[in-house]
Amino acid sequence: MPRSRIYAVQVTSGQEERTRELVLQLLPDVVTDCYTPAYECARKISGEWRTVTRMLFPGYVFIETSDPAQLRDSLRGVPAFTRLLGASEESFLALTDDEVKWLNAFTNIDTHVVEMSEGIIEGDKVIVTKGPLRGREGLIAKIDRHKRLAELEIQMFGRTKRVRIGLEIVLKRIGETQR
């Protein structure tokens, strides 16, 4: 039996969770796992900061299967837009080992959620003290302190993609002063 691999399936943006539930319900014999990776971030709701989750890859559902051809055929029976990413009708693009390693390193394996990171800024250097970005500060392309987000550039789906994950900067030191 071929080994199980993870495939990205394009779905209607905003319908990721509904499509995931349909796939799990209608294709239990074909699908080993089906999930929508998400990330935690802080949002101000009614004047109060709360932790919420957002889609890490809007418009995509990740499906683990050992038979991508059967998956493609079975997806036609799902009453929602689904398109298995691939180079052609017979060639399917599974996530590479590096892409899977990235997902496993950043997301909680059980929930598939990238948890919120926390850090400080000293001069022009970011130091992450807690969370999945700890020790991986070099991956940060941009920080939005007001929205409490970090943008990373990663290789996913065969191209460079910018993803956002939660990063709260709790302290900023400029020389001897603090903010």
Image: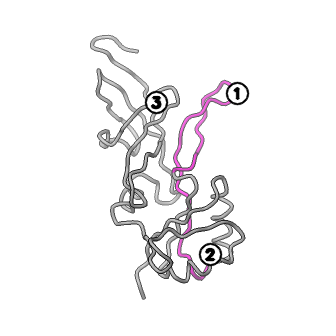
**Location of residue 138 in the rendering, given as x and y in whole percent from the top left corner:** 29, 40
Q: Residues within 10 Å of mark 3 (few under 14, many from 20)?
A: some
The outermost residue toward the right is 79
* First in sequence: mark 1 vs mark 2: 1
Circles 1 and 3 in contact, beta carbons < 8 Å: no
Q: Is residue 59 above or below residue 69?
A: above
Label 2 amino acid? Answer: Leu
- Residue on which disc 3 sits: 144
Label 3 amino acid? Answer: Asp
Closest to the camera, between mark 1 and mark 2, is 2
The outermost residue toward the top is 177
Magenta segment includes 45: yes
The image quadrant of residue 176 is top left
**Residue 92 appears left or right of 121:** right
User: What's the residue at 72%, 70% (across, down)?
Assistant: 79
Label 1 amino acid? Answer: Ser
Q: Nearer the viewer, residue 2 or 15?
A: 15
Please report the bounds of the magenta region as a residue range. Answer: 28-56
User: What's the residue at 37%, 56% (across, down)?
Assistant: 102
User: What's the residue at 43%, 70% (across, down)?
Assistant: 93
Q: Marks 1 and 2, Cα distance to the nearest angstrom?
A: 41 Å
Q: Quadrant of the C terminus?
A: top left
* First in sequence: mark 3 vs mark 2: 2
- Residue on which disc 2 sits: 75
* First in sequence: mark 1 vs mark 3: 1
Q: Nearer the viewer, residue 76 or 146?
A: 76
Q: Quadrant of the N terminus?
A: bottom left
**Residue 68 appears left or right of 121:** right
Closest to the camera, between mark 3 and mark 2, is 2
